[in-house]
Image (cartoon, coloured by chain):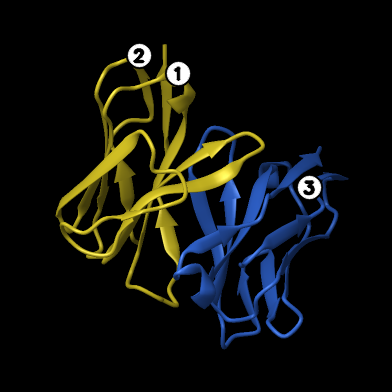
Amino acid sequence: KQEVTQIPAALSVPEGENLVLNCSFTDSAIYNLQWFRQDPGKGLTSLLLIQSSQREQTSGRLNASLDKSSGRSTLYIAASQPGDSATYLCAVQSNNAGNMLTFGGGTRLMVKP
Amino acid sequence: DVKVTQSSRYLVKRTGEKVFLECVQDMDHENMFWYRQDPGLGLRLIYFSYDVKMKEKGDIPEGYSVSREKKERFSLILESASTNQTSMYLCASSREKGSIYGYTFGSGTRLTVV
């Protein structure tokens, strides 16, 4: 059974810092890995999707990497801003989970001005 | 951009009422999903559908049913709402089974049952 873990569960940083969010998964037979952002009381917004054959994806100040063999992904946020404050969720779509998404517990990020 | 639209952002219903949550996607996706999200429990899959008129139970289907009469629309039905169904409900769609293209989520419906 696929299990996804995110560390840390919460993070508070001053504005301007570069930061790394971690995601690990137990089964490397995945179709893809997605990073989502969720603001309080809102839905999930897809930030980056890494297909199983890819190593990384970039969008603006965000960079996500994928190492399937070690079951790890990182989300790097450069020059953090207060507007980045949200919960970040990692999810994998994997063969052994009936093609369903398996979510991590999320990292709650606060960027202080 | 793919859009997944949930018809209501906030709903307040009384115990025992029949409740319909509607979800529409505009990119001809095959698959549609309903999740609920609760503090400390994360996202849990209620029902999903791989095609019109098809439905499959997720992890927590009790107390819910679904309808998919058209490809673009997936409805979640609470036959007799109860207070323990107070939650955030999220609809999602994806292109095809085993897709490498990922999921798109709607903006959520916050349901309160009183």
Count residues near mark 3 (Cα–Cα under 10 Å), then give few for <14, some for 14-19, many for 20+.
some
Name the kind of residue labelled 1 in the image: Thr
Residue identifier under label 1: B83
Q: Chain of mark 1?
A: B
- What is the x, y in percent for residue A63? 68, 70
Q: Quadrant of the C terminus of chain A?
A: top right
Helix, strand or loop under label 1:
helix
At which x and y percent is residue B77? 27, 35
Is label 3 in a helix, a strand or a loop?
Answer: loop
| Mark 1 in CB contact with mark 3 (< 8 angstroms) | no
Q: Are marks 1 and 3 on the same chain?
A: no
Neighbours of disc 1 within 10 Å: few (<14), some (14-19), many (20+): some
Residue occupying the point 25% across, 63% down: B27
Chain shaded yellow = B
Q: Would residue B59 appear left or right of A27 to someone viewing this image?
A: left
Location of residue B17 in the rendering, given as x and y in whole percent from the top left corner:
27, 17
